[in-house]
Image (tube, rainbow, N blue to C red):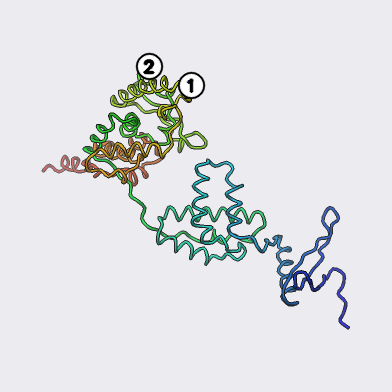
Amino acid sequence: MPKRRSRGDGGLHWDDTRQRWIATATLGYDPSGKRIVKRGSGRTKTEAKAKLKEVLRDYEDGLAIAPTGYTVKDAVTNWLTYGLTDVDATTVSNYTTLCEKHVVASLGARKLRDLSADDVDKWLAAKAKTHSTRTLRLLHSCLNRAVKRAMARDKVKRNVVELCSVPKGQAGRPSKALNLTQAGAVLDAAADSRLHAYIVVALLAGARTEELRALTWSHVDLEGTRPGNAPHIAVWRSVRASGDTKTRKSRRTLALPGRCVAALGEHRQRQAAQRRAAGERWAEHDLVFTSAVGTALDASNVRKYFRQVLATVDGIDPEDWTPRELRHSFVSLLSDKGIPVEEIARLVGHSSTSVTETVYRKQIRPVIQTGAVAMDEIFEP
């Protein structure tokens, strides 16, 4: 006769419904008085007991066992649905597209508890052959945040994604800047465009597209009404979810060149005519740059109108350019004129000169003559 197990040692029985051996162990009672029972199942007695040992070991470590059917897709879907409540809707849409196209399509069917660092490394290495480093970082971040959320909810014991580094991907599309001749041609071509004032201010004042789309007339002073003030715009807002600018130093007040003042004055008159024509359909938000009925422009609107202007300029392929490169052109033209990089960084709202120097300035840097001039004075030629 086999020896009877002691109380609390658990049991082992065959489940006809599941056609599996079930090993159980009682671990006490919860606060409501309900018995705490842990189970492990297997096709053999040995497999069931081994499974129960794993469950008990994780329980003693303070870890819950994830549902065996919980997949990477489940974790990503949960994160997209409940983990992005304070994020702008456009960002959620972008994350959803990235996850569905790249994460779920490649790793979605993998059980989360079986996902290994090798799986993630191979996945990132495959993506690195066709995508930029920036995209790889975004994909890694999305998967990492999804698994981290699942880990916090006891769906998996550890986050292997956090242990994986992001490989170097393909080179992204390099940003460009208009030279002086091209910039003049674009300004002339934009004269009859509905985006005329936008292009003039972006190119001659260097504001970000997200800042210009949120610019209101209350932040525009075309007369310089305050004593000692020149005509200016107050760049204090953006279309970001918070409504604030990108960084603290991005909040700035910019004096306007005369061409900007003239373009904005004409634009205000044109907008007043649009408001009268729209009548009750006009949605008043005090925005400077709007649609024909006063609503805000989105990035795709601005890109479409900008490329329509470029299509009329000889020697420029509109598909190769985006509105943000007007800002790059602003930086490069000032640099080519000899303006110190520190002053340019202040104008464009950069927190330091490193981004201005390495990313935005496209023209040949002005020759630094200080040392040569000083040495000529010290050692006369």
**Number of on-image labels:** 2
For the C terminus, give its image quadrant. Answer: top left
The one nearer the camera, 88 or 153, is 88
> Is residue 165 rendered to the left or right of residue 53?
left
Residue 370: percent from left, percent from top: 22, 40
345 relative position to 14: left or right: left
Q: Which residue is mark 1?
A: 280
Dot 1 or dot 2: first in sequence order is 2
Going by the numbered disc 1, the residue's amino acid type is Glu
Front residue (pair 252, 300)? 300
Is 84 positioned to the left or the right of 270 in the image?
right
Residue type (three-letter) at the residue carrying disc 2: Thr
Position of residue 130 relative to residue 313, above or below, is below
Q: Give the side of residue 264 with respect to residue 316, left or right.
A: right
Q: Residue 179 falls in which quadrant of the image?
A: top left
Q: Quadrant of residue 314?
A: top left
Q: Quadrant of the N terminus?
A: bottom right
Tell me where residue 288 sits by quadrant: top left
Residue appearing at x 32%, y 39% in the figure? 307
